Image (tube, rainbow, N blue to C red):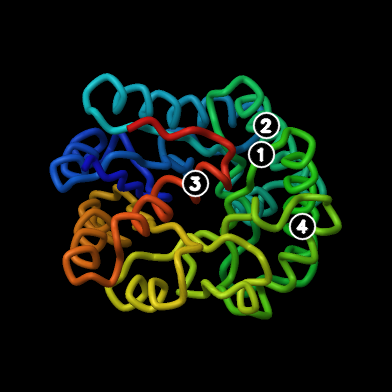
Amino acid sequence: MNLPILDNHLHLDWAGAGVNAVLEFQRAGGTHIVLSHKPYKSAPISKADDYKTSFAITLALAEKVRSETDVKVLVTLGPYPVELLHLSEKMPLSEAKNVLIAGMDLAAEFVRSGDAIALGEIGRPHFEVPPETMAASNEVLLYGMELAREVGCAVVLHTESTTPKVCKDLAGMADRAGLPRERVVKHYSPPLVDTELNHGLFPSVLASEKNITEAAQQGTRFMMETDYLDDPKRPGAVLGVKTVPKRTMKLLNDEVLSEDDVFTIHKDNPERVYGVELEL
């Protein structure tokens, strides 16, 4: 049986391994990736129009993968939340916020055109910042959720460490935006699979052996990711590109997961969350 194996969150960079990383993933048994936009040193953001150049890099990397591998690529685009801090060093916080909002609007246009499947990764800084910065970040995030509701897509969130309390806060924000909680993907999640713990958000679990084993013991309502950065200065960070296929096959061989479970985690779940069909 041809099993689907999707890495739900990884990055690529022309300065890194690029398509060669995806070829490694393919050789390990991987079939699909969700390529998440990230800031690029070659395309810094200083004004709203810069997102056109930055997003074009991610889309070009996706096309390169499609032309040189058999891996199916889905793309998420959005203004990286920490960019707000860098921008606010050069302009008033209100102006910096508007730059990110403009980036969100542009990302939504790519979702409408079918070039991207979700807004992401968006959110708020993962470290302590001044209250006014966090407030502005939350305003941008809420705007992104409202935009996702309007466009009919999911959001992929970068935030502080995931806890039930954080999930409850984010779920409340999704409710205010009118965005179904299931369409809020919590990137870099620990194994908070039980909906009483994640408050209905959809966990994208970082695929360490411990995390995935614990997640599988709770059920199959999760996706798997490496958050591979493709940073030549940090090779293999956060996790290596072969991790998701290797973890999946080990759990299958150890009978922790069944073939039906693999189809649920790697095909049914992303199809439901993102509203797309994954070809095998």
The furthest residue to the left: 27
Mark 1: which secondary structure? loop
Mark 3 = which residue?
270
Residue at horizontal 52 percent and vertical 72 percent from the top: 193
Three-letter code for the amino acid on which mark 1 is drawn: Cys
Q: Residue at x 39, y 58 (%)?
A: 224
| Foreground tag (4 vs 3) | 3
The spot of residue 74 in percent (x, y) is 44, 34
Q: Earlier in the sequence, mark 4 or mark 3?
A: 4
**Earlier along the polypeptide chain: callout 1 or callout 4?**
1
Cβ–Cβ under 8 Å for marks 3 and 2: no
**Quarter residue 201 falls in:** bottom right
Name the residue nearer the viewer: 42 or 216: 216
Q: Are marks 2 and 1 in contact (CB under 8 Å)?
A: yes
Q: In the structure shown, which secondary structural element does the residue marked by tag 4 occupy?
A: helix
Q: Earlier in the sequence, mark 3 or mark 2?
A: 2
- Figure quadrant of the C terminus: top left
- The x and y percentages for residue 30 are 24, 44
User: Quick one: label 3 or label 1, which is nearer the N terminus?
Assistant: 1
Residue located 48% across and 35% down the image? 75
Q: Is residue 212 left or right of residue 127?
A: left
Looking at the image, residue 73 sits to the left or right of residue 81; the answer is left
* Relative height, residue 133 to residue 92 (above, below): below
Query: What's under tag 4, amino acid-wise?
Result: Ala
Q: Nearer the viewer, mark 3 or mark 1?
A: 3
Figure quadrant of residue 106: top right
The amino acid marked with disc number 2 is Ala
Q: How far is disc 4 from disc 3 in space, using C-alphas? A: 19 Å
Q: Could you tell me if the residues under marks 1 and 4 are in contact, i.e. CB atoms within 8 Å?
A: no
Residue pointed to by mark 2: 108
- Neighbor class of circle 4 (other Cα within 10 Å; few <14, some 14-19, many 20+) is many
| C-alpha span from label 2 to label 4 | 17 Å
